Image (cartoon, rainbow, N blue to C red):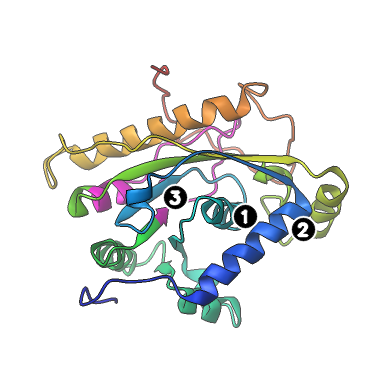
Amino acid sequence: MDTPTATWRPPRFWRAAQVFARLLVALLARLEVSGDVPAALRRGPLILAANHISPFDPVVLAAACQVRGVAPRIMATGGLFRAPVIGALMRHSGHLRVDRGTAGVHRALDDAAVAVARGSVVLVYPEGRIGLDPGLWPERGKTGAARLALACGAPIIPVAQWGSHEVLPYRTPQGMLPGIARSLLRRPVIRVRFGDPLDLHDLAHGAPGAARRGTDRIIDAITDTLVPLRLDEPDRPRHVDPGRPVDTSRAHRRRPPG
């Protein structure tokens, strides 16, 4: 685990990897980035909370953050860190391991809290998985992102993305090559929007129900940020991935915008 003895700075390798991510996204799609991250927050401490719709999301978000001058540490599944080459690259870049479904999952939150305390920008997926909502709207979130924000007092910026589900299928690597070939030919539009900073200061850390209320606010903010990115697909996406299962058990009751 990191120790809060010095301010963390993104390794040059991770900065270079973000540039590569931007080139890769440009090869497969047309990236449109809107909204902004205030200059005072770009080096942290800051929490970015994003929706999760595709295995291609980390590449897209790395590219979009590079456009906005942000180098986030990504909270990612432990399986990536166990991979022979990717795992070493993830560790060298300073990303944060999340071992879901194990007792060690709580350690990830501690590591993230230390990272934020050291001035990092930490990128989290509050849904905790690639969403299975039939309309690809954000699902009811896990409370980890809210608990992190309440414990650290760091600002949260909701990040919405749309279009990455057209590049890589849900069951990647199964079907990955046809998805890439299709994207090379069609180059779908991928939109990423950085929303307005979210204020959770009225919620007391550790108070009963605070983490749940904070989580619902975060998901609402991501949803509201996503709305203008898919005005022509308000209910269901046009691109349907036949390998993506549907699960409505975690449907989030969307608060009307405004």
Instruction: Give the residue at x 48% y 55%.
Output: 69
* Residue 195 left/right relative to 131: left
Q: Name the amino acid type tagged 1.
A: Pro
Tag 1, which secondary structure? loop
Instruction: Confirm whether residue 17 shows in the render.
Output: yes
First of labels 3, 2 by sequence position: 3
Q: Name the amino acid type tagged 2.
A: Met
Q: Nearer the viewer, residue 120 or 51?
A: 120
Residue bearing the label numbered 3? 125
**Where does residue 120 sit, x and y in percent of width and height?**
34, 63
Corner quadrant of residue 4: bottom left
Q: Give how far apart the Cα atoms at labels 1 and 2 are.
A: 10 Å
**Where does residue 79 sit, x and y in percent of width and height?**
52, 70
Quadrant containing the C terminus in the rendered view: top left
Vertical placement of 40 versus 160: above or below? below
**Where does residue 35 sit, x and y in percent of width and height?**
49, 37
Vertical placement of 13 versus 60: above or below? below
Instruction: Confirm whether residue 251 shows in the render.
Output: no
The dot on residue 176 is 2
The dot on residue 86 is none
